[in-house]
Image (cartoon, rainbow, N blue to C red):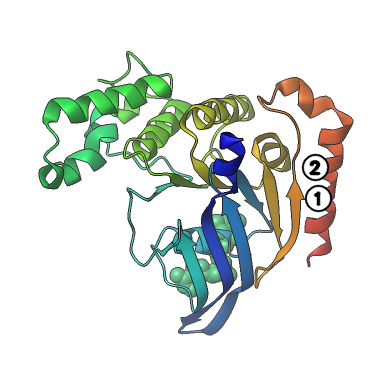
Amino acid sequence: MQHVAHLDETAIEVANLSHIYAGAQGTVPALEEISMRVGSGRFTVIVGPSGCGKTSLLMMLAGLRAQSQGTILCHGRPISDPDPKRVGVIFQEASLYPWLSALDNIEFPLSLRGARERETRQQRRARAEAMLRLVGLEGFGERFPYELSGGMKQRVSIARGLVQDPPVLLMDEPFAALDEQTRMTMGHELLRIWSTMLKTVVFITHSLTEAVYLADEVLVMSARPGRIIDRIAVNLPRPRTYEMMATDVFGQLRDRIWQQIRKTP
Ligand SMILES: Nc1ncnc2c1ncn2[C@@H]1O[C@H](COP(=O)(O)OP(=O)(O)OP(=O)(O)O)[C@@H](O)[C@H]1O
Ligand SMILES: [Mg+2]
């Protein structure tokens, strides 16, 4: 019962959010009347056609961009500025510092705030090393980004997102640049990490298979201006397995998402 009560808590609540970009060429209505609720510890995936406003929405959830209208609450409080201790963000490109080793890249966000929080160098190092192990890169801490594969770089980037231990993790197509095999493995790895850390995850992807494989719930967005046109609960048991992808239930879920997306112009 305790566990269920925890999942009933709301981590993110978006109400009537709309956004219009104003530029030199006129205005672009990007998001329209978005309302969503993400329960604490849940894995929510957002899919939708290119340009429908997914990244814009994520930037707003992260406090990196202000919406024109509507409210966002994260654990009951507004997100008005980026706050990496409350909300971590992982983008499509690993964007590591090329002059820092893998371990130093992971530790970097901690050293930024270290001075303020009186955490010792050894404590920061120990936390960065724990994250390196968690993403399966033990032994690679001293390597520089150019010495790592695309998948390994993305793991470093995930470790860097996790090291500050935010309760909410936002991921914008984190595996889009990877080949299919690495991508499948990374998805599986991410679920393993997520199940041990009990994070709330909002994950954007264009891959319908990835969406069904990862999600508790899939939100489907319309073409611009983006609205949420369907919410699909994925009730496949956890831990998820590769074999589930071949089941009828999996196929039906993926099909339903595709039917919704193709309806949008
Ligand atoms: N800073 C900006 N200024 C003006 N318009 C913008 C800005 N950022 C995004 N847009 C516009 O808002 C719309 C939504 O963009 P966004 O990047 O959120 O879409 P997306 O769903 O993430 O697309 P993709 O799947 O291709 O990544 C697009 O039409 C885009 O041109
Ligand atoms: Mg995007």
Q: Is residue 51 in view?
A: no
Q: Is residue 166 in view?
A: yes
Report the residue marked by disc 2: 254
Where residue 85 is drawn, which disc sits there? none
Q: Quadrant of residue 208?
A: top right
CB at disc 1 and ligand 1 closer than 8 Å: no
Residue in front for this viewpoint, 130 or 29: 130
Q: Residue placed farthest to the top in the image?
A: 139
Image location (x, y in percent) of residue 102: 29, 27
265 with respect to 248 (left or right): left
Q: CA distance from mark 2 to mark 1?
A: 6 Å
Of the residues shown, which amino acid type is indicated by label 2?
A: Arg
Q: Quadrant of residue 117?
A: top left
Q: Is residue 250 above or below residue 40?
A: above
Image location (x, y in percent) of residue 184: 62, 27
Q: Secondary structure at mark 1?
A: helix
Q: Quadrant of residue 247?
A: top right
Image location (x, y in percent) of residue 220: 71, 56
Name which residue lies at 41% across and 22% down: 134
Count residues near mark 2 (Cα–Cα under 10 Å), then give few for <14, some for 14-19, many for 20+. many
Of the residues shown, which amino acid type is indicated by label 1?
A: Trp
Residue in front for this viewpoint, 48 or 99: 48
Report the residue marked by disc 1: 258
Picture quarter with ligand 1: bottom right
Name which residue lies at 74% across and 41% down: 234
Image location (x, y in percent) of residue 174: 51, 41
